[in-house]
Amino acid sequence: MAGGDVPTLLGRLPGWPKPAHDTPRESLDRRLVIAPHATTRCAMTTAHVLDRELEAPFAGREDDLLEKEEEPSPDETQPRQPASWPLQISKVERSIFELHRSWKNGVLRLDPDFQREFVWDYWRQVKLVESVLMRLPLPVFYLSEENEEETLVIDGQQRLTTLFSFLDGEFRLSGLKLLPELNQKHFKDLDGKVQRRFENTPLTCFIIQPGTDEQVKFQIFERVNEGAVALNAQEIRNCLYRGPGLDFIKHLANDASPGSFRDVAGPSRVYRRMRADELVLRAVALLDLGVDRYPGELKSFLNDELKRLNASTGEERDALAHRLKHALAHTKTVFEDHAFCRYKPSDGSWARQLNGPLVEVIVAGFDRFFPAGMPLPPRKIKAIRDRFRTISGEEAFRDAITFATQSTNTVRTRFDLWMKELAHVA
């Protein structure tokens, strides 16, 4: 922990009991209970430090293969239906035993795709278990009750996974500073009283009730995940919009066969945290809905597309996949190893990172002017490549793929400019 280990931290907290000369068992019992006179401030401080320390190692783990885009601030994006959105959240306490039983029964979902890269190391897991045994207050958990048979974990998946793993005997304790008597023990080796203390530990849960609007849920996900391990928008969609449409996007994003998105964008690229999924979804959304239906807010646009895809037929999704594959084939032919990357006229080089706006506009452009069945002769390939280099030096297009890229005007600007270039070639 920052500033010292657990004993050092507790020594700084007001109201923490001083060490006493007890028998080993009395000493253990004493250390398993925070003194009654420990203040609320002590508990709040402990929870804050634990939250920060347990999550901090994952901060900043973003890939650098995708150019960052400026997103509009909350003040600039107004919800489309603020007055009519139902919002139902309840606060309850559930014991570790109750949540574990729900998980075993398949009701509580700890989806490995949701936060698949956030895997705690052994020592972080041990520290959490020790904190529970010491009855240190933990940060709250956020759940979403989809129906009577399914509850999703919004925030706290790694903590619950750790607690359940210890309960199931998947790792033993070691290196404990405050409770050395428990070192080298699995859960089954603990004294019955300590086992019950662990199982009966109450965890504070905020549960989003069924019927809450999906757009509201999306914003709740974003708000409760504004900490060190903030989920990105696509990870949230992966939890909220399960269905054939989401599976369709996952398949397109994970496919690495010749002519796939991963192949065209660069087979050696590594995409963390579902970045490929979102890029594919952006391309598909513009193919399916078109730029004229873009509402000025990318997140809601992609959310709506996933809802539509989930309700679509297999034939409709197959048709979209065919259009995307054909546009990707043209992209590979024209741009070769520089697909979806910015061109820099100043020195004639290409950016290394992918550019999200270019994924949208290049795929949509080829789909509109060179659809399936229309080949690209060599002279048109050269003409498109030359026009892209030329337009990349124009301020209006350069700004439209670089600054405020998600606003309606910017999206329309880059589409209009690139479509005019392709129209000259076609």
Image (cartoon, helix red, strand yellow):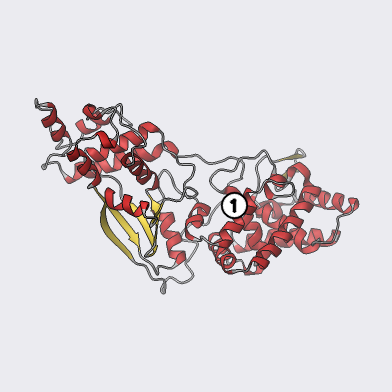
Please say if 144 is above or below 200: below
Residue 253: x percent and y percent?
63, 51
Nearer to the camera, 358 or 400: 358
- Residue placed at 15% from the left, 43% from the top? 39
Q: Position of residue 47 (x, y in %)?
A: 27, 43
For the C terminus, which image quadrant? Answer: bottom right
For the point 36% across and 38% down, which residue is it?
54
Q: Which residue is mark 1?
A: 277
| Left-right relation of 65 to 92 | right
| Residue 196: x %, y % from top left | 20, 43
Asked which quadrant contains residue 87, the reply is: bottom left
Residue 342 in view (yes/no): no
Tally the marks. 1
Q: Pick the residue in front: 204 or 231.
A: 204
Residue 150 lies left or right of residue 366; in this view the side is: left
Give residue 237's position: percent from left, percent from top: 51, 57
